[in-house]
Image (cartoon, grey):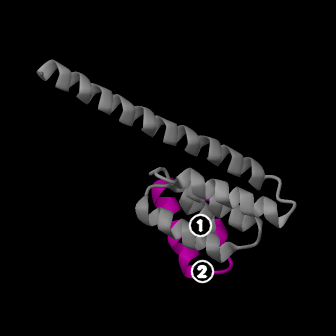
Amino acid sequence: MSGRAARAGTAAVTVAVLAWLGVMERDVRLRARGVAAAGQLRRPADVARAEADLRGARFLNPDTAPDVDRAVLYLGVGRPRQAAALLEDVVRQEPQNRIAWAVLYGATRGRDPAAAGRALAALRRLDPINARGRG
């Protein structure tokens, strides 16, 4: 009976791993499609499709890259407050995320000096050489 139980356990783990890989593959496809759609923002429907794809890419995915992509989308369509709010969530989760800090700096520079200052300070701490010319 223990051999049968071991095989059943192995099969259950295999199914779980395959299901997780399927979810991750779906998230990668949605992110790529969302980024591609964000590059062609001609109609409100394009924005909505890109946003939906990027939200879908985050489903069950711990990676915050789709959130940063969505923030860039928001900046591209003139929604800097929404971008900044999303990026604030990202840097709270990942305080070492230089890309999120850089995009947050761009989203808040000239609009929210306190947030821009925090972002610039984080960039200087994380990447002192490349952040030297900013600000």
Q: Residues within 10 Å of mark 2 (few under 14, many from 20)?
A: few
Q: Quadrant of residue 107?
A: bottom right
102 to the left or right of 14: right
Q: At numbered mark 1, what does the secondary structure look like: helix, strand or loop? A: helix
Q: Position of residue 52 (x, y in %)?
A: 66, 59
Magenta part of the protein: which range? Answer: 106-133
Q: Quadrant of residue 110?
A: bottom right
Q: Quadrant of residue 6?
A: top left
Q: The disc labelled 2 sits on which kind of residue?
A: Pro
* Residue 110 belongs to magenta span: yes
Q: The disc labelled 1 sits on which kind of residue?
A: Leu
Q: Residue at x 56, y 45 (%)?
A: 27
Magenta segment's dominant SS is: helix
Q: Residue at x 48, y 67 (%)?
A: 89
The answer to whether 86 is drawn above or below residue 20 in the figure is: below
Q: CA distance from mark 1 to mark 2?
A: 12 Å
Q: At numbered mark 2, what does the secondary structure look like: helix, strand or loop? A: helix
The residue at the far right in this view is: 42
* Residue 53 belongs to magenta span: no
The residue at the far top in this view is: 3
The residue that disc 1 covers is 104
Q: Nearer the viewer, residue 129 or 42?
A: 42
82 to the left or right of 40: left
The image quadrant where one finds the C terminus is: bottom right
Give the numbered dot on residue 113: 2
The answer to whether 44 is drawn above or below residue 58 in the figure is: below
Q: Position of residue 96 (x, y in %)?
A: 44, 55
Closer to the eye: label 1 or 2: 1
